[in-house]
Amino acid sequence: MENQVVSEHERNISSKVDTTKGFNIKKLIKNPIIYLSLIIFSLINVYPIVWMVINSFKSQQEFSLDPFFLPDTWRWDNYIDAWQTANLGTYFFNSIFVAVISVVVTVLFGALASYFLARFTFKMNKLVYVLFIFGMIIPIHATLVPMFILMNNLGLLNTGWTLLFPYVAFNLPLTIFILTSFMKAFPKDIEESAIMDGCGIFRIFWSIILPMSRPAIATVTILNFIHCWNEFSFALVLINDESLKTIPLGLANFAGQYNTNYTGQMAGLTMVIIPTILLYVLLEKHIVKGMTAGAVKG
């Protein structure tokens, strides 16, 4: 009897060992494939940027003859010419002003609206949410003429605040969609505990919900900033004053009637993408970090 028990125990151990070996073999095969796929995907995304930066140091002739290799002479004066041609000094300030103000207003009002849509139940809740989301399917180009007429009637054309209104309006739907979905996942226990401690609605929003929403807020901040930074259509239609134009309009100065200064344009684009990359580096840790982990115990 003891021998049978021992043999069964040995068989169980051997089966567990075989299962562990099989799992390890699958893991050894699976991991390199995943890493290789990620490396290839990263190279595909990084290569155009590297190619642009390299060619920004070439002359026009060198770029035409050899666009895929390192330059013989690294021409830093391309950046000086690009800065002057695109008037980036003025346009940089205008773009930063419009993008920062638009993002702050959009995230603030979007977070507040998302809080009430996600955490409160009222009659028009679903209808209001659907109306906000409906804004995501409206094509921007279909609103250019009505927006121009509206801004003209309000006397807001060619002012420092002109672009803020369409930027906030068109960024709010996506912001509310992401933040509402994120806030709905929060457990009710957090708010119940805060209410028992004497917190009001807005205190809960500012002190609890908003800090816990940092990953989603970081995501919508990056998306909204990129949209405002790169937006061309509204800036072209609503702004005619040279002192108020934004960077996308300045980059169009490299394209002439008969030719295009590609190396200068690449130098300008290289300088233009720096703020976006810096913003992503600053907010990246908040995107991957879950702020609700461990918020509720027991």
Image (cartoon, grey):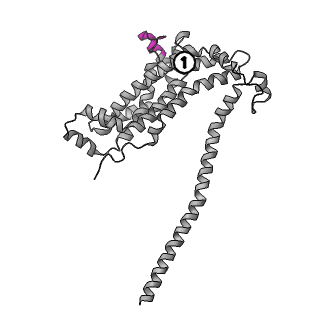
Residue range of the region highlighted in magenta in the rendering:
148-158
Residue type, numbered disc 1: Phe
| Coordinates of residue 2 in the picture (x, y in percent) | 42, 88
Whether 198 is drawn above or below 169: the answer is below
Whether 57 is drawn above or below 193: the answer is above
Q: Reply yes or no: does residue 27 show up in magenta.
A: no
User: Crowding at label 1, few (<14), some or many (≥20) Cα neighbours within 10 Å?
Assistant: many
**Dominant secondary structure (helix, strand or loop) of the stretch shown in magenta:** helix
The quadrant in which residue 29 appears is: bottom right
The residue that mark 1 highlights is 92
Q: Reply yes or no: does residue 149 show up in magenta.
A: yes
| Coordinates of residue 261 in the picture (x, y in percent) | 71, 19
Q: Residue at x 52, y 72 (%)?
A: 17
Work out which quarter of the rendered image holds the N terminus and state it. Answer: bottom left
Q: Is residue 165 left or right of residue 251?
A: left
Label 1 residue SS: helix
Whether 194 is drawn above or below 75: the answer is below
Q: Residue at x 43, y 42 (%)?
A: 289
Q: Residue at x 30, y 34 (%)?
A: 207
| Coordinates of residue 21 in the picture (x, y in percent) | 55, 68
The quadrant in which residue 254 appears is: top right
Q: Residue furthest right?
A: 65
